[in-house]
Amino acid sequence: MAYTPKPGDGTLFVNKDAKGERAPAMSGYITAHRDIKAGERVRLAAWSKGGDGGRDKFLSLRMEDERERREQPAADPFG
């Protein structure tokens, strides 16, 4: 079964077919979870994955809105 990314998630894979030093080292896609306006900044987070069991290394991506980060309540340092 093929992986279907959830809205806000994406993946970058190593570009094995890079032709020349100006080619991107990695390429992939992200599935937007909403419409994005031109010039708008969207926060991305990445996790290094793979490289085990013969799998190629890749980056797992998560797109997050700045306003979502601000709206999250701060963690209580005393539990």
Image (cartoon, helix red, strand yellow):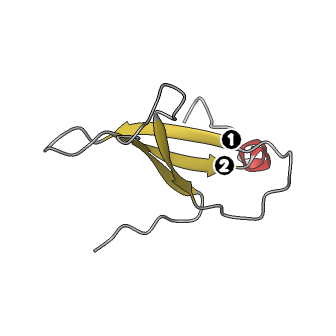
| Other-residue count near label 1 (Cα within 10 Å), few / some / many at <14 / 14–19 / ≥20 | few
How busy is the neighbourhood of tag 2: few (under 14 within 10 Å), some, or many (20 plus)? some
On screen, residue 23 above or below 27: above
In screen coordinates, is 40 left or right of 12? Answer: right
In the image, residue 4 above or below residue 28: below
Looking at this view, is 11 or 77 the one in front? Answer: 11
Q: Which residue is situated farthest in the top direction here?
A: 21
- Label 2 sits on what residue type? Glu
- For label 2, the SS is strand
The first of marks 1 and 2 along the sequence is 1
Which residue is depicted at the point 50% across and 38% down?
A: 46
Find residue 59 and name its label: none
Q: 16 or 68, which lies in front?
A: 16
Residues at discs 1 and 2 in contact (Cβ within 8 Å): yes
Tell me the quadrant of the picture where the C terminus can be found: top right
Q: Mark number for residue 43?
A: 1
Give coordinates of residue 66: x percent, y percent.
76, 44
Q: Is residue 41 left or right of residue 19?
A: right
**Residue drawn at point x = 46 percent, y = 39 percent:** 26
The single residue placed furthest to the left in the displayed view is: 53
The residue pinned by badge 2 equals: 64
Specify whether 62 is left or right of 42: left
Indicate the position of residue 45 as horizontal and vertical percent values.
56, 39
Q: How many numbered markers are drawn?
A: 2
Q: Amino acid at mark 1?
A: Arg
Res 50 quadrant in image: top left
Q: Nearer the viewer, residue 65 or 71?
A: 65
Percent x, y of residue 13: 40, 45
* Residue 74, percent from left and from top: 69, 38
Q: Secondary structure at mark 1?
A: strand
